[in-house]
Amino acid sequence: MDKHVRIITVSALSLLGIFCISSGVMYNSLQVNNVEEKVLVIVEQKQVSKESDIDIKLKNLTIEVNTPLSVKIIDYLDSAVSDEVLANLKLDTSGVNVTEPGTYNYTVTYKKKVYQGIIVVKEKEVNTNILQSITLKTVNINVGTALPTDVSNYVIEPLTDDIKATMLIDLSKVNVNKAGSYQYTITYNNSIYTGTIVVTETQPTLSTDIGENTNTNPPQSEEQNPPTTENENNTQTN
């Protein structure tokens, strides 16, 4: 009987020891998991950029007089910025007078910081190959004659193809089927020039034989005296 009791007691103690060891292992495992979770949270923290890291550079622009200014801020930026920064930029070109040549300043503001750029307004360049004015011809044609379509037929000055391409001719008031004097116009370099086209009746062809004898019969020869015979000469001598 004593032997059985001892065996049971020893077995119970053994089971208790195993349970304690298992509990300790589980506790250690839980602590390790908690440490790993803390590390993951630190790695996933979002890094926020500082405003001092944003560098905005503006363009120095040159335009001709009366050229409209762009209202898009991106057209004035000389450096790339994020969409978030772009949405917070404010453009001010109120100090630029596009109607008068000169050098002007414009600004772009981001939050409380102001950036400054330059806009140069210059006179329009004059093409020396362009005629300042033109002189129109007085054109004479016969009734029924088609009008030429090449504008150079109506302008005294020599014209290049580039200049002719800028001209607009109006012949709508000319009636080539009726004799008379008509006006035509050419629009060039923001000016309208007026010329004259004279339509005349076709003249009949004149004969080149005027004043000459038109008789086709050959002229008759004068009657000649018959030759004198020797007997007639002797008679006249006696």
Image (cartoon, rainbow, N blue to C red):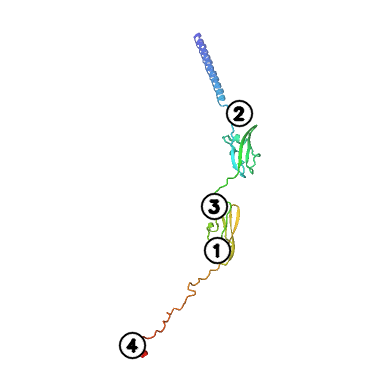
- Pinpoint residue 232: horizontal percent, then vertical percent: 35, 89
Tell whether 215 sits left or right of 82: left
Secondary-structure class at tag 2? helix
Q: Which residue is mark 2?
A: 52
Residue lying at the far front of the rendered structure: 238
Nearest to the eye among marks 1 and 3: give it: 1
Q: Which residue is mark 3?
A: 163
Q: Amino acid at mark 1?
A: Asn
**Residue 228: quarter of image:** bottom left
What is the crowding at mark 4: few (fewer than 14 residues within 10 Å), some, or many (at least 20)? few
Of the numbered discs 2 and 4, the one sitting upstream in the chain is: 2
Nearest to the eye among marks 2 and 1: give it: 1
What is the crowding at mark 2: few (fewer than 14 residues within 10 Å), some, or many (at least 20)? few
- Disc ID at residue 150: none
What is the crowding at mark 3: few (fewer than 14 residues within 10 Å), some, or many (at least 20)? some
Of the numbered discs 2 and 1, the one sitting upstream in the chain is: 2
Q: Which residue is mark 1?
A: 140
- Residue 39 seen from this side: yes
